[in-house]
Every structure is written in C-alpha cells, then in structure tokens.
Amino acid sequence: MISVFKIIILLLSILSIALLSLTFFIPSDSEVYRLLSMFDFMLCGVFIYDFITQFYRAENKWKYMITHGWLDLLSSIPVVSQLRYVRVFRIFRILRIIKSVSMLVQFVRENKAMSVYGFMIFLVCSLLIICTTSVLYVEQGIGNIKTAEDALWWSFITITTVGYGDLYPVTNVGRLITVVLIVSGVASFGALISYIDHRAGALKNK
C-alpha cells in the first residue's frame, strides 16, 4: 500500500509544475521569481530524497532505474535560469504528473482515511507557497517585506504563530493573507497531532 509520504510526493509533483508554469509570466530578475525558484529547489530536494529512498529500498535497483527510476531522478533536477538547457527537465516533471495521477487514484481507493492526511499536508504546503508569494507581490515597494528572504522569514514566523513582529504586512490584502496563513498553521498542527495519534493507535492494536 502507498504511504502517506508517497501521496504527498505525488501531490507535490503536480504543485511543482504549477510553479514552473507560473515562472513563464514573471520577469526573471524580480524577487517573486527568485522566491518561486527557492520553492522549486525545496520541492526538488524532497523529490531527490524520495528517489534515493526508493532506490535504496528497491530489491532490483537496475529494474527500478529502467522502469521509472530515471524519470524520478530527472524530474528532481531544479530549473536553473543560468542554465537554459536545464529547462528541458520540465518535460520530465509533466511525465511524472501522468504517473502521479494514476497512483493517486489507487491510493485513495486503497485507504481513504489516510489519504485525508496526505491531502491536508499538501493543502498546507500549497497555501504556504501561495501566501508567501502573494504577500511578497503585494507588499514589495510598500511595506517592509521587500525580498524573497523577507517573505520566507515572514511566512515561517506566521505559520508557526510565533510572530516576532519584525516583518509584517501593511496593506489590507497582506493582512488577509496573514490570517489565512495563521489559520492554516493552526490546522496543520492539529492534523499532525491527529496523525500521530492515529498511528499510535494503529501500532497499539497490532
């Protein structure tokens, strides 16, 4: 049976294509583009970890590589703007999505209860990326969130509900985005506790 981690990987594969598609409409010298590139690197880090894990666990490593291991590896390469030819790996991301859709359907059919946790984590990750990108787009040039690093730091302290107060939105739209991110942070911690409790209960019953 597919694990919750696998369902998250499959969903993040779809999210990565959405991010790469968005970069077509944003100037490559902007802070928003830099932020999206950072998120792409983070997602690729997760993908390469997934590839290494699958390769290590595969009984027949050669068979894994010639079937879909090569696709997992190539789709884990981030798109670097300085190396234009690397953008061809967008194609492998699309191929990965095709594989992901069928596996998603299989996972939901096999375990509907556990799939809720996977979708919840995916939703939080998506909201984190959307809110971070949106607040940078809205606030740069107006408030004190001016760079990609500022936006990342703001999103981290906001979703964890720490709120140092060194970076904050000054526009109404930015404040609304902050509320969404805070709520998603609280919900994600609740989902995490629920998942841990669910796993502990399942292990106890074995």
Image: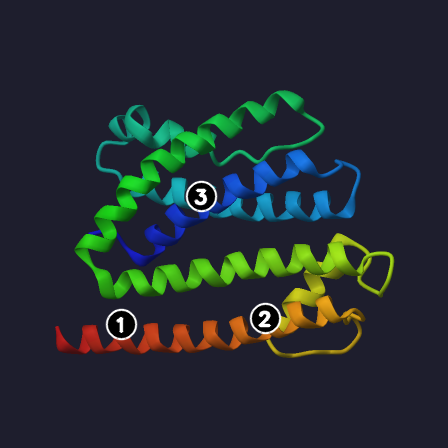
Disc with the residue nearer the chain's start (2 vs 1): 2
Q: Where residue 95 sits in the image (x, y, percent)?
A: 40, 30
Disc with the residue nearer the chain's start (1 vs 3): 3
Q: Mark 2 sits on what residue?
A: 180
- Helix, strand or loop at label 1? It is helix
Would residue 128 be seen by someone viewing this image from the given angle?
yes
Image quadrant occupied by the C terminus: bottom left
Q: How far apart are marks 2 and 1 (CA)?
A: 28 Å
Q: How is the model colour-coded?
A: rainbow
As drawn, 164 above or below 4: below
Question: Residue 199 got which mark?
Answer: 1
Specify the farthest residue to the right.
141
As drawn, 11 above or below 98: below
Q: Nearer the viewer, residue 147 or 71?
A: 147
Q: Are marks 2 and 3 in contact (CB under 8 Å)?
A: no
Amino acid carrying label 1: it is Arg
Q: Residue at x 57, y 48 (%)?
A: 42
Q: Distance between the residues labelled 2 and 3?
A: 22 Å
**Quadrant of the rendered image containing residue 121:** bottom left
Q: Do the residues labelled 2 and 1 touch (CB within 8 Å)?
A: no
Disc with the residue nearer the chain's start (2 vs 3): 3
Q: Mark 3 sits on what residue?
A: 14
Amino acid carrying label 2: it is Val
Q: Is label 1 or label 3 in front?
A: 3
Q: Where residue 52 sits in the image (x, y, percent)?
A: 40, 41
Q: Which residue is drawn at 51% across and 39% down?
A: 17
Would residue 149 be seen by someone viewing this image from the given angle?
no
Amino acid carrying label 3: it is Ile
As drawn, 75 above or below 122: above
